[in-house]
Amino acid sequence: MSTTEHTVHSIELRAVTKTYLSAAGGFTALDEVTLNLDAGELIAVVGKSGSGKSTLVNLIAGIDRPTRGEVLVAGTRVHALDVSRLAAFRGRHVGVVFQFFQLLPTLTVAENVMLPMDFCGTYAPGEARARAAELLERVGIADQADKLPATLSGGQQQRAAIARALANDPELVVADEPTGNLDSRTADEILALLTGLARSGKTVVVVTHERDWISRFDRAVTLVDGRVEASA
């Protein structure tokens, strides 16, 4: 790979504005945000409630679209993709970790991890099971593979959610308050897992209210009223 390719930003937001419309009028959640994030970075997104944190990560992940501006992930203009192409791109290139896990309760942990592989057709059925086992081993819950999510602790469910996010080996992992419902020790372990993902070369973007942990991130993006106040 050439030096030029190495300098391409993993994520680029170019003058991104997101306005939500309601009966009461428009609400601008993000206002002219320009931001570059690189591969191998562990990035915290911080700010008060309503500052635009979740909107920012939803736009980066392709879950939502900007009202104006451009969102590029690994060089792909995700804001310009149609619904089906966006879903396919997100399934293959973006892993999302939610605060409330969002594991399907009627599927085993391994089956939950296999879902993104089935959706994208990235692995044959036999290979998908082996891939799920490998990922569950990586996050430390290989022994929970055949259990239903409800039988796991909160920390184990979040580990399963991280394994599911990694199913298709995405370049980008986005986590929205992934430690919000966990005790401090388990939260610390989850952050260590996310740090390891960044060190392996992935771009990891984490919305967090844990300001005491900011020093553990490579960068902190601070949002105030929909604008980037600081990124350092």
Image (tube, rainbow, N blue to C red):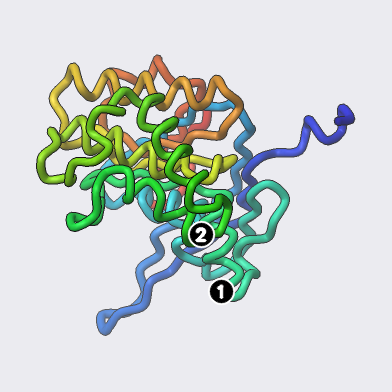
**From the viewer's perspective, is 141 left or right of 214?**
left
Q: Looking at numbered disc 1 in the image, what kind of residue is underneath it? A: Ser
Task: Name the residue located 25 percent from the left edge and 28 percent from the top edge.
Answer: 143
Say which of marks 2 and 1 sits in front. 1
Q: Nearer the viewer, residue 169 or 66?
A: 169
Q: Nearer the viewer, residue 72 or 26?
A: 72
Q: Looking at numbered disc 2 in the image, what kind of residue is underneath it? A: Gly
Number of other residues with Cα within 10 Å of mark 2, as a class: few under 14, some 14 to 19, many 20 or more: many
Give the residue furthest to the front: 126
**From the viewer's perspective, is 45 left or right of 99?**
right
Residue 229 is at least partly visible in this image = no
Task: Name the residue located 55 percent from the left edge and 20 percent from the top edge.
Answer: 199
Identify the element where label 1 is drawn.
helix
Task: Name the residue located 31 percent from the left edge and 28 percent from the top edge.
Answer: 142
The residue that label 1 is drawn on is 84
Q: Is residue 153 above or below residue 18?
A: above
Number of other residues with Cα within 10 Å of mark 1, as a class: few under 14, some 14 to 19, many 20 or more: few
* Image spot of residue 194 (x, y percent): 41, 27
* Image spot of residue 88 (x, y percent): 57, 63
Give the residue furthest to the bottom: 23
* Image spot of residue 24 (x, y percent): 26, 80
The residue that label 2 is drawn on is 62
Q: If the image is split into quadrants, where does the N terminus sit?
A: top right
Q: Nearer the viewer, residue 202 or 225?
A: 202
Q: Disc 2 versus disc 1: distance between alpha carbons?
A: 12 Å
Q: Is residue 157 above or below residue 59?
A: above
